[in-house]
Every structure is written in structure tokens, then in C-alpha cells.
Amino acid sequence: MSILLVILGFVLLVVGGEFLVRASVALSFKFSISKMVIGMTVVSFATSAPELLVSLQAALSGSPAIAITNVVGSNIANIGLVLGITAMVGSIAVDKSFYKLNWPAMMLFSAAAYYFLVNDSLLSAFEGAILFAGLIVLMLIFIRNTKKDNAVEDVDDSLAVVSNFKIGLWLLIGATALYFGSEWLVNGAKDIATTIGVSEAVIGVSLIAIGTSVPELAASVIAAAKQEKALSLGNLIGSNIFNIGSVLGLTAIVKPIPIPKDSPEIMASQIYWMLGFAFVLLPMIFIPKRMQIGRIKGFLLVFAYGIFMFLVFTKSKF
């Protein structure tokens, strides 16, 4: 029954997230917001909704370990699993914005989250507000830089003519699916943790994190196999930044997140792996082939992710 709840939870989160993104974009067009701003803010926030609902549900239901490891595990999976497997299918080109803005911003947010958590084993409402405010500032910088480059985000123009009734229906479906999906996923994950005798932190950083990364992984691999633009490294890094600034930040504002005493592995190991996977991207794009992540580098990322997962379940002190 627990496994069924988890599967249904993941399905509802995917469905709810898709409806919420469509409704948010369509609603933004109604308010005459530019495509660029919609793509860089509205879509980004909407696509983070599943992770946000999972962390909120976990925090409010007394499972702070899941609330934290959902973000930590997703950030690790985005680089080790999604980027790694996609690069093994087809090489990914890297532009200069990676090391000029995207990567430094990701490291700054990752380091801030680490400091806030290690300082007193608690992510307070004030610290969450700092993370979220930092995200807003960063979004403004991204928008300004995008305007200079005359770039426009890929936003579906057909959503500009959607009726108000359909927007309302999509919002209702999206919100309902996200609510029940997050509740079922968290409850099912907690039951599985109890059944197999592992901590909620282990389930959060593995099962939940991988599950929330599967849709992005599937889309990236299919695109790479078709030799289309498989994955924007900037978008992937943006997802990691949003996970910290939006998911962790907003969750902490609503409900401060403590590190449970029975889950010391969060600070003893998992968050260091998150920092490590984020850091290693910088030297990786310069050695040996510059500004490209190819099959060998992709394999190394996946291999490192495999080691991480093995150590998580064997409860090694790493």
C-alpha cells in the first residue's frame, strides 16, 4: 500500500505541476507580462511547485528530514543523474554564462544553505526569508542580463488565448493534484522508511529525490536521443538554485525546519555531497575538453552518484 501511495503521489505531482505551469503562463499573458519574464520567473516558480509542496507537507507533518533531503537529494540527482545520463547520450555544450553567473550563484546559495543549517541545526523563518529574497534579486539580475542579450525564453504562445474558465479549471486541477500528490508521497515514503528500517532522511535523499527528477531526466534523454537541444546546463543549475531559494526558503518561512537528532547524516555527509557535485562542475567544463560535457564526464557523474547512493543505504560515514 505504501508503494502504491508513493507511485500515485509521483503521478499526481507530475500532472499537477504540468497544469499549474500552463495555468500560470496563461494567466501571465492575461496581465500582459512579457514572454521573457514569464519564462524566467513564472515558469521557474511553477515548475518548482511539486518539490515545494512535498517539502511543505513533510515539514508540517513532522518530517523535517524529508523537507531538507528532498532538496539536497534533488540537487545531487540533477547533476549526478540527470546531467550525467543526458551527457552519456549526447554531449552538452556550455556557454560563458555558466562560470560568469550561473555556477557562482549556485555555489553561493548552496554555501548559504549549508551555513544556515550547520550554524544551529535549524533553518529559521528569517534565514528562509534571506534565501527567498536572494532568489528574487538573482531573478532580477537574470532578467537584466537576458534583456542585454536580446534573448527570449521558449514560452508556448498558444497559451495566450486560453479562456478564463480553462485557466481556472487548470489551476483547480493543478492545486488539487499537487496537494494530494505531496500528501500521499510523504505518507507513503514515511511508511516505507519505517518498514525497511531506514531513516526518513535516507528515503528523502533517494526515493523522493530521484522520483521528482524522473520527468526531467526522461525529457532530457529523449531530446538527446533525437539529437535535439537536450538540456540547458543553465536551466539545470537554475533548478538547483530554485530548490534552495524557493523550496527551502518558502518552506522555512511557513515552518522552520530543524535537523532531526535521529538524522545526523544530513549534515555529516549528504549536504557535503551536494556541495561537491556543485563544485566539480567548474573544473569539469575545462578539463580535458573545454566548454563541453561529453560521454566520459557524464559517466563519471553517474558513477559518483552510484557511489553516493550505495553509501547512503549502507549507512557509511562518508
Image: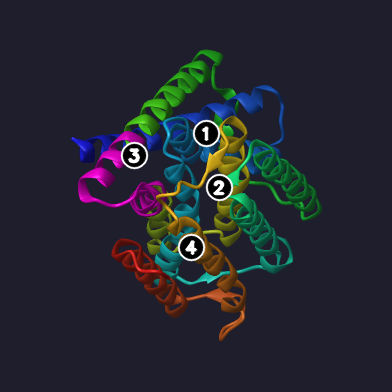
Q: Within 10 angstroms of label 2, few (less than 14), some, or many (20 or more) residues?
A: many
Task: Please tell me which residue lies in front, 228 or 214.
Answer: 214
Between the C-alphas of marks 2 and 3, the distance is 17 Å
Label 1 close to label 3 by CB (< 8 Å): no
Q: Within 10 angstroms of label 3, few (less than 14), some, or many (20 or more) residues?
A: many
Between the C-alphas of marks 4 and 2, the distance is 21 Å
Amino acid type at mark 4? Ala
Circle 4 residue: 268
Label 1 close to label 2 by CB (< 8 Å): no
Amino acid type at mark 3? Phe
Between the C-alphas of marks 1 and 2, the distance is 16 Å
Give the mark nearer the N terminus: 1 vs 2: 1
Residue 229 showing in the rendered view: no
Q: Quadrant of the C terminus?
A: bottom left
Label 4 close to label 1 by CB (< 8 Å): no
Start-end of magenta stretch: 186-214
Circle 2 residue: 243
Asked if residue 301 is positioned above or below residue 199 in the image, the reply reads below
Q: Quadrant of residue 298?
A: bottom left
Between the C-alphas of marks 3 and 4, the distance is 29 Å
Q: Secondary structure at mark 1?
A: helix
Residue 132: x %, y % from top left: 67, 41
Q: Quadrant of the N terminus?
A: top left
Residue 209 showing in the rendered view: yes
Give the mark nearer the N terminus: 3 vs 4: 3
